[in-house]
Image (cartoon, rainbow, N blue to C red):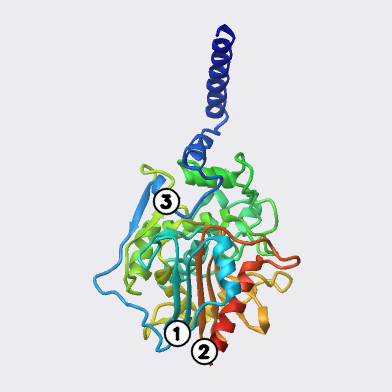
């Protein structure tokens, strides 16, 4: 019994010492990560984790728009391969939208048309849309305006060359570490820390901006700060006014904040909404900035955003991932757990998938295997209808 007490006392001293060290070295955010993730039975961020963070409400308007059902709505069953993929990866929503109408729709695990789940990095495409709106309204001069005009800490040396467009196209040259496994990485800190603005202002530009693609979530977070400064509004307010209300979103959504006090949205991720409202951004971009007959964004920007900025890095444009799978010109919103809004304009087709996890990356491709399956099986279902 005496040895047990000594062991427990030693363990307690060790744990207290670890906690003190975390605070001393500014890693106390790890404690929140442990509480939100491991103490809820998970091993990483998950689609319902917004409930454990402060959030700001993205308000919808009095007038909502329902994407109509196609005349062939749910007339063709999912293929065996699609069902197997959806089951193995925990798909909770899968939609095929053909000719701006819902052709196929399926939900699982008790999720439905109004269920909110985390967008993860699909939010990057939405922040790019906010940037385009701010340019359209004159808050930002254009893609070539220096970031330093809005955030003086980035107005000297290499940083002075970094533009708003560099942030959207993932070519900033920032010293951000895009690591999802290390609890000590800046990516983890940005997810669980309570002051994102300070985290961002500690960054440095270490590579020549505007020369090559390098995917960094910090780019979008800094872009969010630029939009916030340029418009004088929170990202949530600007999103509500510019898109959520004009596009007739069916439901309010939530945008995760770093904390209730400082109130900065996690611009690189974390909009909690439903599959049909996410799909409306696909409609907007597929239709070159026109939504339900109304011009929302400039057509020229849509064309630019959905084409590669850098010929050698043809997997990304401005805020959108790109693919030529099946010989199609495809652009997509993408989240880390296999959240997708996949747009194929030439066939007037949108595919939406939300779920718990994604597959493995295909060698020499910038997408995981499930991305290609969702597209291929959608076309097989459409062929079966024909």
Label 3 close to label 1 by CB (< 8 Å): no
As displayed, is residue 285 above or below residue 241? below
Q: Is residue 338 visible?
A: no
Cα gap from disc 2 to disc 1, whole angstroms: 8 Å
Is disc 3 placed on a helix, strand or loop?
A: helix
Pick the front one: 105 or 307 = 105
Label 2 close to label 1 by CB (< 8 Å): yes
Which mark lies nearer to you, 3 or 2? 2
User: Which residue is tagged 1?
Assistant: 75
Q: Residue at left 45%, top 84%?
A: 75
Question: Of label 2 and label 1, which has the lower sequence position?
Answer: 1
Residue 125 placement (x, y as % from top left):
51, 67
Q: Is residue 61 visible?
A: yes
Q: In the image as oriented, which residue stretches furthest toward the left?
A: 62
Question: Of label 3 and label 1, which has the lower sequence position?
Answer: 3
Residue 26 placement (x, y as % from top left):
55, 32
Q: Residue at left 58%, top 14%?
A: 7
User: Which residue is tagged 3?
Assistant: 50
Q: Residue at left 33%, top 56%?
A: 57
Q: In the image as oriented, which residue stretches furthest toward the bottom?
A: 386
Label 3 close to label 2 by CB (< 8 Å): no
The local crowd at label 2, few if under 14, some if 14 to 19, many if 20 or more residues have their Cα within 10 Å, is: few
Q: Could you tell me which quadrant the N terminus lies in?
A: top right
Quarter location, residue 58? bottom left
User: Which residue is tagged 2?
Assistant: 385
Residue 86 placement (x, y as % from top left):
55, 66
Quarter location, residue 69? bottom left
Pick the front one: 200 or 75 = 75
Q: In the image as oriented, which residue stretches furthest toward the top?
A: 2
């Amino acid at each position: 019994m005496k040895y047990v007490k000594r062991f427990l006392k030693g363990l307690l001293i060790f744990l207290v010492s670890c906690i003190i060290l975390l605070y001393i070295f500014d890693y106390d955010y790890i404690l929140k990560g442990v509480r939100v993730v491991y103490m809820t039975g998970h091993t990483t961020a998950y689609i319902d984790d917004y409930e454990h963070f402060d959030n700001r409400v993205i308000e919808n308007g009095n007038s909502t728009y329902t994407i109509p059902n196609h005349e062939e709505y749910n007339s063709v069953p999912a293929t065996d391969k699609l069902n197997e993929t959806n089951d193995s990866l925990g798909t909770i929503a899968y939609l095929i939208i053909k000719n701006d109408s819902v052709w196929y729709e399926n939900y699982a695990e008790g999720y439905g048309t109004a269920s909110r789940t985390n967008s993860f990095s699909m939010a990057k495409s939405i922040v790019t849309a906010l940037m385009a709106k701010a340019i359209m309204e004159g808050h930002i001069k254009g893609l070539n305006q220096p970031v330093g005009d809005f955030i003086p800490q980035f107005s000297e040396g290499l940083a002075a060359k970094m533009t708003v467009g560099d942030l959207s196209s993932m070519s900033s040259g920032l010293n951000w570490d895009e690591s999802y496994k290390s609890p000590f990485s800046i990516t983890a800190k940005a997810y669980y820390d309570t002051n994102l603005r300070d985290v961002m202002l500690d960054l440095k530009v270490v590579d020549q901006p505007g020369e090559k693609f390098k995917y960094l979530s910090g780019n979008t977070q800094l872009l969010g700060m630029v939009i916030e400064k340029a418009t004088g509004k929170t990202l949530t307010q600007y999103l509500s006014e510019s898109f959520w209300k004009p596009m007739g979103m069916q439901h309010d959504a939530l945008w995760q904040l770093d904390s209730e006090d400082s109130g900065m949205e996690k611009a690189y991720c974390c909009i909690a909404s439903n599959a049909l409202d996410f799909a409306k951004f696909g409609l907007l971009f597929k239709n070159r900035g026109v939504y339900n007959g109304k011009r929302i964004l400039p057509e020229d920007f849509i064309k630019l955003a959905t084409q590669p900025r850098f010929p050698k890095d043809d997997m990304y444009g401005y805020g959108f991932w790109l693919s030529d799978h099946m010989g199609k010109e495809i652009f997509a919103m993408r989240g880390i757990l296999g959240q997708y809004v996949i747009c194929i304009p030439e066939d007037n087709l949108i595919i939406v998938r939300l779920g718990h996890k994604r597959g493995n990356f295909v060698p020499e491709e910038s997408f995981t295997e499930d991305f290609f399956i969702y597209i291929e099986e959608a076309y097989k279902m459409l062929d079966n209808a024909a």
